[in-house]
Amino acid sequence: MAKVIRMHQTGGPEVLKLESAELGKPGPGQVRLRHAAVGLNYADTYFRNGTYPVPLPSGMGVEGAGTVVEIGEGVSHVAVGDRVTYTGFVNTLGAYCDERLMAAAPLIKLPDAMAFDTAAAMTMRGLTSAYLMRRIHPFKAGDTVLLHAAAGGVGLIVAQWARLLGLTVIGTVSTEEKAAVARAHGVTHTINYSHENVAERVKALTHGRGVDVVFDSVGRDTFLGSLDSLRRRGLMVCLGTASGTIEGFNPNLLAMRGSLYLTRPALADYIADPVEKAELADELFGHVVAGRIRIEIGQRYELGEAVQAHRDLESRKTLGSSVFMI
């Protein structure tokens, strides 16, 4: 019997329940995977609260790492015993468990030197960081980036990758503890948004010019301030809506602030092509294995602590990445 976290209705963290489930045999194109670690992402809370609707009852989580223990008909790119990781969206939903049946297609083989908890903590965040750094904008040394949630899981990876590319990173944080963590991972300047005006500080730090790119995972609370932080014809990248959805956006705001560009990318569209996915994964894994990018796991939970894990995520108590250890 597998141990799984399910929800039978949407709502707060308390709707997450630890249950048992029979798995059976993998079907065509499927594998049976034994998890060693499972990643937590802020997007998990959107499935739980109904922002991302899914049929109920439903499993939770979209990212994990472990060992293939059985394969179904037609599976050829992984074999029994392979160490793998995966991430996705609805196609991988159900990761909060110790074992699962799932489609083999999303699986990525792990380098021998990479630990399972590292993989579970970084596959979604790392591939997100990879496309942000390598696909979203033609960065050149000397460019400046405003990075919201700089001490979060994506933030810490982006900051380190940006340093490798010679970029200046201005990072926003909510506490001095998070500011210290962000600076230790490559953020050049930190802004504590709890008592500093972000756009004013950005303009002061850039001598009135503004930044080339903003990476904003916060949403409603930071949207206008992010636009006001950009240089003329700068790029606003909306990554998430941790503070709420951006409502009633008027495109004229972009013209009024200097002919700005705006994009709302999704990881799925940058890993849909297997060749591109492999390129991004190989570069990411290479940086991590070589120690050029460190993955910080700030929180480790047991599977039965899913309710507390979601409370910690939503209260912004977490630092770096969070994982369930199986």
Image (spheres, rainbow, N blue to C red):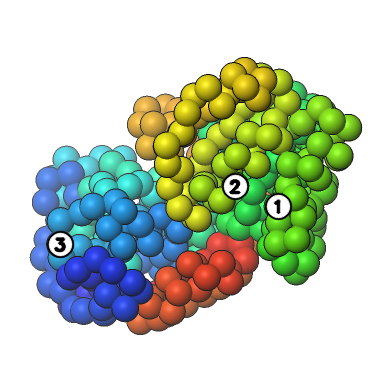
Label 1 – label 3 distance at C-alpha: 37 Å
| Residue that mark 1 sits on | 172
Image coordinates for residue 206, horizontal then vertical, percent: 84, 34
User: Nearer the N terminus, badge 1 or badge 3?
Assistant: 3
Residue 149 horizontal side relative to residue 206, left or right: left
Residue drawn at point x = 31 percent, y = 78 percent: 14
Image coordinates for residue 326, horizontal then vertical, percent: 40, 74
Front residue (pair 139, 130): 139
- The answer to whether the residues at label 3 and label 2 have Cβ atoms under 8 Å apart is no
| Residue that mark 2 sits on | 222
Residue 38 horizontal side relative to residue 300, left or right: left
- The answer to whether the residues at label 1 and label 3 have Cβ atoms under 8 Å apart is no
Residue drawn at point x = 41 percent, y = 55 percent: 43
Residue drawn at point x = 48 percent, y = 67 percent: 314
| Residue that mark 3 sits on | 56
Residue 202's place in the image compared with 62, above or below, is above
Rendering quarter of residue 80: bottom left
Amino acid carrying label 2: it is Thr
Image coordinates for residue 102, horizontal then vertical, percent: 23, 54
User: Nearer the N terminus, badge 2 or badge 1?
Assistant: 1
Amino acid carrying label 1: it is Thr
Q: Give the numbered dot on residue 44.
A: none
Residue 322 in view (yes/no)? yes
Front residue (pair 112, 88): 88
Q: How many other residues sit within 10 Å of disc 1, few (<14), some (14-19) or many (≥20)? A: many
Label 3 – label 2 distance at C-alpha: 33 Å
Residue 133 horizontal side relative to residue 106, left or right: right
Image coordinates for residue 148, horizontal then vertical, percent: 64, 48
